[in-house]
Image (cartoon, rainbow, N blue to C red):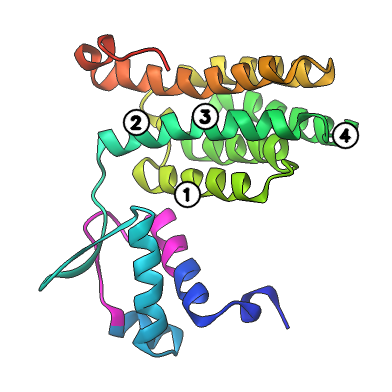
Amino acid sequence: MTAATSLSKSQQAYHWIKERIARQEFTPGYRLVLGSIAGDLDMSVVPVREAIRQLEAEGLVTFERNVGARVSMVDDSAYRYSMQALSVLEGTATALAARRLTADDIRAARSINELMIETLDHFDPRAFTSLNHDFHQVLFGKCANPRMIELVDAEWARLGHLRESTFSFVPGRALESVHEHENILRLIENSAPLGEIEKAARRHRSATLDAYMIHEHPDEALGLPAF
């Protein structure tokens, strides 16, 4: 039995819809017709409805009486809240995973970061963001708290819906980002205090949010509290 077929029908529907939201096939405002989705997946509308409820709880879908389910509209406030939440969650997960990372893990992360550096000459924000996710997944992937990983993954998925790539708005942030990656790797290699590793990972995420807010909402950004 494959991993896909081992999932319940509602989970199959959940992942099917979520992947299409992440790939922008189902864009903000897109109406999710339960019967049509059920037909595509060859299942009844019951598991599709359950999947929609789960996506609604994650903020990816909205449901209105007499209107139905739609992919949530992009909201800068929602983006800011997700980035703030991710800075805390990912910073903690990275610190909790730090002592479990092997030399091979560090090499893998550094190799991904080198690929990110190579893309800077012919910058592709979407490809850079994909590599950025891969890099961070190596760092937090061995966190011993599975719930923490679930929460980090959920915020990454939510950000993928809210913004295909933040670096499309602030491409100059990409160079700073790869330098910060190397700093985090060195802290982990040198067995720095976990609090220092967590602080660096959180500051790294917050800096991307700050760059975006300064670019898109300079007046509002000036009034943001340090996070």
Q: Which residue is mark 2?
A: 80
Dot 4 or dot 2: first in sequence order is 2
- Given residues 121 and 49, the one toward you in this image is 49
Range drawn in magenta: 17-34
* Label 1 crowd bin: few (<14), some (14–19), many (20+), radius 10 Å: some
Horizontal side, residue 31 vs residue 114: left or right: left
Residue at left offset 76%, top offset 27% = 110
- 10 vs 77: above or below: below
Give the SS element for disc 3.
helix
- Given residues 169 and 101, the one toward you in this image is 101
Q: CA distance from mark 4 to mark 1?
A: 27 Å
Measuring from the top left, give residue 164's x and y in whole percent: 40, 42
Question: Residue 162, located in which quarter of the rendered image?
Answer: top left
Q: CA distance from mark 3 to mark 1?
A: 16 Å
Residue at left offset 55%, top offset 35% = 89
Q: Which residue is mark 1?
A: 157
Dot 3 or dot 4: first in sequence order is 3
Three-letter amino acid code of the residue under disc 2: Arg
Q: Which residue is mark 4?
A: 102
Q: Is residue 25 visible?
A: no
Residue at left offset 71%, top offset 26% = 114
Dot 3 or dot 1: first in sequence order is 3
Dot 3 or dot 2: first in sequence order is 2
- Given residues 190 and 116, the one toward you in this image is 190
Three-letter amino acid code of the residue under disc 3: Val
Q: Which residue is mark 3?
A: 88
Give the SS element for disc 1.
helix
